[in-house]
């Protein structure tokens, strides 16, 4: 049977509570705060709950709670205050100090038993969850260490660095092709189809994690076969129709192979994300061979890119409150951005072709 300590300076209250609870628990008693703290010092590890009066001689209930907080016992034992006082200020103060519940006088046996039972069960469930979180955190820490070790090993391998050089080369090839198209477009239409180009290479850690999620071991062959976005190019355009026109001009080139297309502009993700993704196979020219390498090219408008940057911060920051509300606001912003992009495009068309 679980052990409970009842602390009250009135013997009548101690005996009443003992009679109510002794069928389910081993009930010990204390006459005041000093005696309670002594018993807790001797055996707090085996204590299932503490029923504590607030107003007592020598050391009152608040003194006991303060001492329990200092020693960390408040996190190990659920405390239920037994009191005839109903002041909101007192209850708030006790709850802020870590008290689990209140049992008000005069005592009703069924309420006392249920409150004690619920407090113990909830406290045990909370401790179980905290233990699970600690175990998961330790597991994640070990996984992170493994990933870091694998990434370090990978980054030191000559063959891996050679592969990364090839991915850097394909980025340069795509950037050159886009800049040529930009010059041609500017010559023909007197404006530029895109505002800027950004590029990036996945880190060894990111490559390892992606292969692990997909269930593949870390080999150069698996990187080339199953990670299509090691090399990434992001093209920021002014208007949606420039995205489609530029993507078409790029993929029409006879040395480029379109492997996959995901149109999140036409069919946005549930969170509002909009972008056009192309997985391309593009030739690079090495000292002794011509080789096709995969590259992901993303096309976004300026507003889409700003939105995606903000959404990325929300996804990877852990200490943010009200994430549901922020996600709702981001979705509303994404919808507004879509309307604004097409409205600006319409205004541009009216400026370029005033007779239409």
Image (cartoon, rainbow, N blue to C red):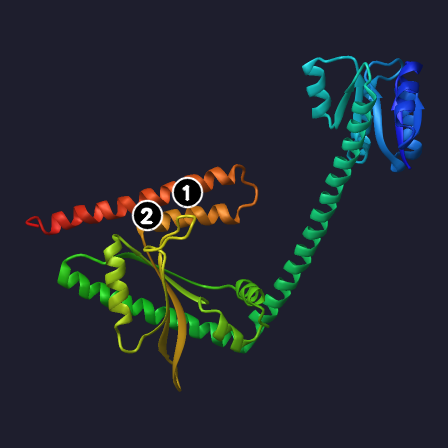
The residue sitting at the front extreme is 110
| Spot occupied by residue 188 in the image (x, y as percentages of width and height) | 13, 63
Q: Is mark 1 on a helix, strand or loop?
A: helix
Mark number, residue 330 = 1
Spatial CA distance of label 2 from label 1 is 12 Å
When asked about the image quadrant of residue 11, the answer is top right
Residue for point 32% across, 45% down? 337
In the image, is residue 201 above or below residue 99?
Answer: below
Tell me if mark 2 has few (under 14), some (14-19) or many (20+) residues whose alpha carbon lies within 10 angstroms of its own: many
Of residues 175 and 114, the one nearer the viewer is 114
When asked about the image quadrant of residue 1, the answer is top right
The residue sitting at the bottom extreme is 288
Viewer-side label of 2, 1 = 1
| Spot occupied by residue 355 in the image (x, y as percentages of width and height) | 5, 49
| Spot occupied by residue 320 in the image (x, y as percentages of width and height) | 54, 40
Question: In terms of sequence position, does the residue under pointer 2 or pointer 1 come before the other?
Answer: 2
Residue for point 92% across, 22% down? 30
Tell me if mark 1 has few (under 14), some (14-19) or many (20+) residues whose alpha carbon lies within 10 angstroms of its own: many
Residue 147 in sight in this render: yes
- Residue designated by label 2: 303
| Spot occupied by residue 281 in the image (x, y as percentages of width and height) | 37, 74
Q: From the viewer's perspective, tell me whether residue 231 is left or right of residue 85.
A: left
């Amino acid at each position: 049977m679980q052990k409970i300590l009842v602390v009250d300076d009135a013997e009548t209250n101690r005996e009443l509570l003992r009679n109510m609870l002794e069928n389910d628990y081993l009930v010990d008693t204390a006459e005041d705060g000093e005696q309670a703290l002594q018993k807790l010092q001797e055996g707090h590890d085996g204590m299932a709950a503490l029923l504590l009066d607030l107003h007592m001689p020598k050391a009152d209930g608040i003194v006991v709670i303060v001492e329990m907080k200092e020693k960390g016992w408040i996190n190990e034992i659920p405390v239920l205050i037994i009191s005839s006082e109903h002041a909101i200020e007192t209850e708030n103060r006790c709850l802020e100090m870590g008290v689990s519940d209140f049992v008000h006088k005069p005592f009703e046996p069924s309420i006392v038993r249920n409150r004690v039972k619920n407090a113990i069960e909830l406290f045990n469930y909370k401790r179980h969850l905290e233990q699970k979180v600690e175990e998961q955190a330790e597991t994640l820490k070990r996984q992170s260490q493994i990933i870091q070790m694998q990434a370090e090993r990978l980054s030191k391998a000559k063959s891996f660095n050679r592969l990364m050089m090839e991915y850097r080369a394909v980025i340069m090839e795509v950037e050159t092709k886009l800049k040529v198209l930009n010059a041609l477009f500017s010559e023909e239409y007197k404006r530029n189809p895109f505002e800027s180009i950004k590029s990036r290479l996945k880190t060894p850690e990111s490559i390892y994690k992606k292969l692990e999620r997909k269930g593949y071991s870390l080999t150069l062959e698996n990187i080339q076969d199953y990670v299509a976005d090691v090399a990434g190019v992001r093209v920021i355009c002014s208007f949606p129709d420039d995205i489609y026109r530029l993507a078409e001009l790029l993929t029409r080139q006879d040395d480029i192979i379109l492997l996959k297309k995901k149109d999140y502009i036409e069919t946005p993700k549930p969170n509002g994300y909009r972008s056009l993704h192309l997985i391309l196979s593009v030739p690079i020219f090495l000292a002794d061979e011509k080789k096709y390498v995969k590259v992901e090219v993303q096309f976004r408008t300026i507003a889409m890119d700003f939105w995606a940057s903000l959404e990325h911060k929300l996804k990877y920051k852990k200490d943010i409150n009200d994430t549901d509300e922020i996600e709702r606001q981001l979705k509303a912003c994404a919808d507004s951005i879509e309307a604004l992009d097409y409205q600006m495009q319409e205004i541009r068309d009216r400026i370029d072709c005033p007779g239409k």
